[in-house]
Amino acid sequence: MPRYVVRCGLMRTLFVMNSRTDHRRGDIVVARTNRGLERGEVLCEATDHVLGQMSSPPNGNIQRIASTEDENEHRHIVESQKKEFAKCKKLIQEMNLPMSLVDLEIILGGEQMMVYYSAEDRVDFRELVKRLSSEYKTRIEMRQIGARDEAKLLADYGDCGKPVCCNTHLSEMPPVSMRMAKLQKATLDPNKISGRCGRLKCCLRYENDTYEELAVEMPNVGSEIVTSQGRGKVIGVELLAQQILLVTEDNRRILIPASDCLTVLKRGVEH
């Protein structure tokens, strides 16, 4: 039985799904997940190589190619979600709950409504769930999300002029540290290295492994080294160019290839 990676829902969750028929990339399908019937997009076949790149993906089953009726229902749900969002937001305000409604999602089969919200502290939303369940006659799931997930739902374009990574190709958002920005010699101005979520940009992580590999072979700033041109002290490194800025014993500043470093006499601080 063929298996495929299928992307479903507002949070763009990746599922590994069984299917009784063959599919191609881009096929819009109706699938059964742990939430019920959902509309999804086939991304690729779930080969051993692909599965090796995924971390415990949820499972599901492709039911069929989405029909005209399925697509009409999907459009109707998307349109109705705007109205339901306004109703839910008004209800939260009336109940004076300390939470901010971010988005709302009704799955294709109407079996569940997901309410995404942000809040500083724990919120007692039992009465809200009770009233929503009574009105919509479906299961309500409240999901508290952080700043990065909020950007994934709401953000459009990044500083690069392209759609933000979190709501296009990223399925997971691993942590990004200031050390990554320093290693890549990015500006440390928070306004320039922060994404739409207010956190460090995810793209700082993309080339970090390469930078770390290159850094292993380079002497740290402050190191005393011996080169083909004599001894000197490292005052700067260019990782991508694999070059070292050196102050020689006679106070000359020279730029040499990393390959000209013959030995490190005394290692300086980290990059």
Image (spheres, helix red, strand yellow):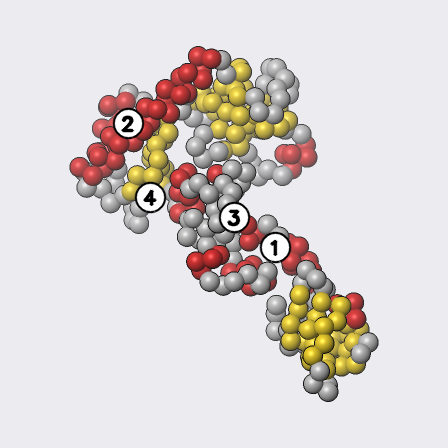
The residue that appears at 43% across and 26% down in the rendered structure is: 35
- Mark 2 and mark 4 lie on one chain; the one further toward the N terminus is 2
Q: Position of residue 252 (x, y in %)?
A: 71, 82
Tell me the amino acid under the disc marked 1: Asn
Whether label 2 touches label 1, CB < 8 Å: no
On screen, residue 175 versus residue 45, left or right, reads: left
Asked if disc 2 and disc 4 are in contact, CB closer than 8 Å, the reply is: no
At mark 3, the secondary structure is: loop
Q: Which residue is mark 2?
A: 83
Looking at the rendering, in which quadrant would you find the N terminus? top right
Residue 120: x and y in percent read: 31, 49
* Residue identifier under label 4: 118
Q: Which amino acid type is marked by label 3?
A: Cys
Name the foreground residue: 217 vs 154.
154
| Residue 233 vertical position relative to residue 167 in the rendered view, above or below | below
- C-alpha separation, residue under disc 2 versus residue under disc 3: 33 Å
- The number of numbered badges drawn on the structure is 4
Which of pointers 3 and 1 indicates the residue nearer the eye? 3
Residue under circle 1?
Answer: 208
Observer-nearest of 211 and 19: 211
Dot 4 amino acid type: Ser
Packing grade of label 3 (10 A; few <14, some 14-19, many >=20) is few
| Mark 2, secondary structure of its residue | helix
Among numbered discs 3 and 1, the one appearing first in the sequence: 3
Residue in the picture at 62% in, 22% down? 24
